Image (spheres, helix red, strand yellow):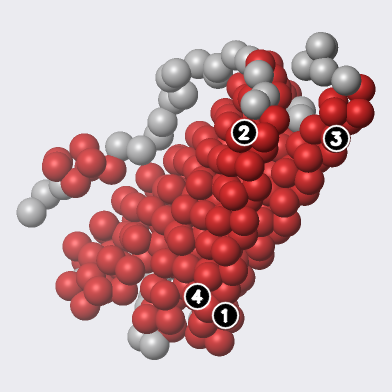
Amino acid sequence: MPDEPKHIVSSFEADLKKLRDMIAAMGGLVERAVAEASAALLNHDPEIASRVIENDAAIDAEQHKIEQFAVRLLALRQPVADDLRQVVQALKVVNDLERIGDYAANIAKRSIVISQVATNFPLAGLGQMAHLVQQNLKASIDTVGESDPQKAIQVWRADQMVDDLYNTIFRELITYMMEDARNISTCTHLMFVAKNLERIGDHTTNIAELTYYAITGENLPDFRPKGDHTATYIHTAPN
């Protein structure tokens, strides 16, 4: 905003910093939700799972606060160019964060059911997937605050590993269900857990893409290789 008085520019920069700080705070809540939902699953801990479900309302409340603040900035400041991109980015990022919070709550709900039944399915793969998703989520939220386009690219690329793990887990679960029909119920819940983690990875990638655009004014390539071939696998799986 080259034609604006210096004090107005400085004030708007302070507003943008506040906006980034609010996103970081919401991101912290979401990171904790994903971490605790994963712990509830891996440790068969319904108490932690219940806490994740209860705390989802706080994430929703943060989303509304940030949206109201961002809309106020648009109305009062009427930003243009890179300033406008930052505010629009914030509105989209908090939507992704809210969806990630919802997926964490879904994982927590299913972990309660899973904890009530015995399962022979090893959870190491899901643990690895959850760990990678948490790493990428933290990196994407850090990228928003640091305005680092290279880190955004790294997150964008790292999601391929999440997809690959998802496909491996999906096929293993199908095998368990085919070997013993008694595994179907538990494995179905685990499939949804894996899918929720995969979707968290996708929303994390969205945050990285939005951040890259807000910083550079350019889009990352439309095509990012996806490793999700489960629809084909379902179609071709033997009856």
Mark toward the viewer: 1 or 2: 2
| Up/down of 104 relative to 199, above or below | below
Q: Earlier in the sequence, mark 4 or mark 3?
A: 3
Q: Earlier in the sequence, mark 1 or mark 2?
A: 1
- Give the structural element (helix, strand or loop) at label 1: helix
Quadrant assignment, res 186: bottom left
Residue sitting at the far right: 6
Kindly identify which numbered label has been placed on residue 74: 2
Q: Earlier in the sequence, mark 2 or mark 4?
A: 4
Q: CA distance from mark 1 to mark 3?
A: 39 Å
- In the rendered structure, which amino acid carries the disc numbered 4? Ile
Residues packed near mark 2 inside 10 Å, few (<14), some (14 to 19) or many (20 plus): some
- In the rendered structure, which amino acid carries the disc numbered 2? Leu
Q: Which residue is mark 4?
A: 53
Residues packed near mark 3 inside 10 Å, few (<14), some (14 to 19) or many (20 plus): few
In the depicted view, which residue is nearer to us: 67 or 50?
Answer: 67
- Which residue is depicted at the point 46% across and 24% down? 224
Count the numbered circles shown: 4
Q: CA distance from mark 2 to mark 3?
A: 14 Å
Residue 88: x and y in percent read 58, 32
Q: Is residue 81 visible?
A: yes
Q: Which residue is mark 3?
A: 11
